[in-house]
């Protein structure tokens, strides 16, 4: 079982022309898409996120409204030092107003700090660590798409509720994996389950044999995959080779994407021809939604002053066809419904991209960590 967030589209918004643009710095709203362009997370984020951001700008109607919006991109290579260097250059020399996406939680935490120092704006879609709205929360950052607390409580509690009480974690060895393992273990234990063991693997690992043998020998009922992207794909492939599922253990993918495994909407139909025929992942759809809401806030303020735009985004409710009504809390957490889904058996799928069946809807007020429990200094 996996937790999927239905991500979505914002209606196009208009921006005043002429004098209303007087407070736009350098006459351009510059959006920097920073992510993994060629590694383990390239499919779930990567070039597709750039496509999503440009679609948001197009649907916003910036050109028709006389407003110049530019989208640039770079590859952070899943390295915090590389991401930080790019962010500093973008903010200091290239006039970037807002950085979006940034999968790989260790990189996102670094960008979060740089953005705060430079007093710019950061819209997170790809990273998952719940620390971004907890101890590391910032008035300059909004966490849009999902986080480890939501993933853990959606999938973990549901599986434990079925009677599967013993777990073994296969965890990506960096900030994201550690946070997801931590948050899921807390849910498992709280609901009467037990963690029999855990093993950590490097990012973008190619051989999972030794890790999976440890998981198999533990006899745990559930093998929790606290990883994502190519690592999840390889984990599942190698687990099949070892006959782990046939042997009675189940794999719980804590963060699985449609590209890893079709609910169709107008956005997906438009996105696919622009990006190798693929359906958008929740990260890429989140980029679209976040960028549109950002531009809506710029419109309302008639300014791209970063702290003011972030504050305005929090002030304005979100409402779109797939997210439904939502809001952004003081800690920077975007709130909306979540869905618990199960991957269909091949015999159940009616065609390409028809992979999910919805098991339950988790209402927005239950899907995310309570605001007062995150230890965010911005919450009073």
Image (cartoon, rainbow, N blue to C red):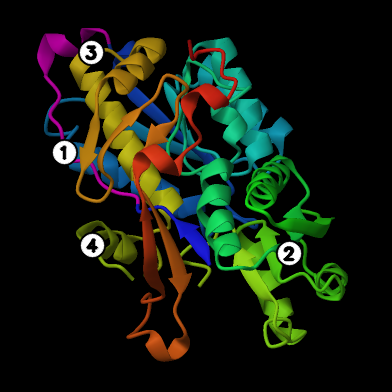
Q: Would you place residue 142 above or below residue 34 in this image?
A: above
Mark linked to residue 12? 1
As helix, strand or loop, the secondary structure at mark 1 comes to loop
Q: Would you place residue 178 above or below residue 2 in this image?
A: above
Q: Is residue 241 left or right of residue 115?
A: right
Disc nearer the start of the sequence (1/4): 1
As helix, strand or loop, the secondary structure at mark 3 comes to helix
At 56% from the left and 55% from the top, the residue drawn is 157
At 33% from the left and 65% from the top, the residue drawn is 272
Q: Is disc 1 in contact with disc 4, using a CB cutoff of under 8 Å?
A: no
Disc nearer the start of the sequence (2/4): 2
| Whether residue 378 is visible | yes
Is 16 in the magenta? yes
Q: Is residue 47 left or right of residue 112?
A: left
Mark linked to residue 301? 3
Query: Which span of residues is magenta-colored?
Result: 7-23
Q: CA distance from mark 3 to mark 1?
A: 17 Å
Mark linked to residue 166? 2
In the foreground, 2 or 219: 219
Q: Residues within 10 Å of mark 2 (few under 14, many from 20)?
A: many
Q: Foreground mark, 2 or 4?
A: 2
Number of on-image labels = 4
The x and y percentages for residue 355 are 41, 75
Q: CA distance from mark 4 to mark 3?
A: 31 Å
Taken as a whole, is the magenta stretch helix, strand or loop?
A: loop
In the foreground, 350 or 183: 183
Residue matched to label 4:
265
Q: Would you place residue 373 above or below residue 325 in this image?
A: above
Q: Quadrant of residue 310?
A: top left
At 80% from the left and 54% from the top, the residue drawn is 202
Disc nearer the start of the sequence (2/3): 2
Q: CA distance from mark 1 to mark 2?
A: 47 Å
């Amino acid at each position: 079982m996996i937790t999927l967030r239905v991500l979505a589209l914002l209606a196009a918004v208009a921006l005043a022309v002429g004098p209303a643009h007087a407070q736009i710095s350098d006459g351009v709203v510059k959006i920097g898409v920073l992510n993994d362009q060629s590694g383990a997370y390239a499919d779930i984020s990567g070039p597709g996120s750039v496509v999503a951001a440009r679609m948001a700008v197009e649907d916003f109607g910036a050109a028709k409204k006389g407003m110049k919006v530019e989208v640039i991109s770079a590859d952070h290579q899943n390295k915090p030092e590389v991401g930080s260097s790019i962010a500093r250059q973008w903010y200091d020399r290239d006039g970037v107003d807002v950085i979006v996406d940034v999968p790989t939680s260790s990189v996102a935490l670094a960008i979060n700090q740089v953005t705060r120092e430079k007093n710019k704006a950061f819209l997170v879609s790809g990273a998952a660590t719940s620390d971004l709205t907890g101890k590391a929360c910032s008035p300059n950052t909004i966490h849009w798409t999902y986080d480890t607390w939501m993933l853990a409580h959606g999938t973990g509690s549901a599986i434990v509720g079925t009677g599967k009480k013993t777990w073994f974690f296969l965890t990506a060895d960096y900030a994201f994996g550690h946070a997801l393992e931590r948050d899921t273990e807390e849910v498992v234990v709280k609901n009467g389950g037990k963690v029999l063991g855990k093993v950590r693997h490097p990012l973008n690992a190619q051989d999972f044999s030794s890790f999976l043998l440890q998981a198999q020998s533990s006899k745990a009922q559930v093998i929790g995959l606290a990883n994502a992207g190519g690592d999840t794909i390889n984990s599942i492939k190698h687990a099949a080779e070892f006959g782990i599922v046939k042997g009675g253990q189940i794999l719980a993918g804590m963060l699985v994407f449609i590209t890893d495994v079709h609910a169709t909407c107008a956005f997906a139909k438009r996105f696919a021809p622009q990006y190798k025929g693929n359906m958008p992942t929740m990260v890429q759809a989140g980029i679209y939604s976040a960028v549109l809401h950002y531009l809506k806030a710029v419109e309302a303020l008639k300014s791209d002053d970063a702290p003011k735009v972030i504050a305005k985004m929090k002030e304005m409710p979100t409402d779109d066809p797939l997210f439904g009504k939502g809001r952004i809390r003081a800690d920077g957490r975007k709130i909306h419904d979540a869905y618990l889904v199960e991957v269909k058996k091949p015999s159940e799928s009616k065609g390409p991209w028809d992979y999910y069946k919805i098991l339950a809807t988790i209402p927005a007020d239950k899907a995310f960590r309570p605001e007062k429990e995150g230890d965010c200094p911005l919450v009073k």
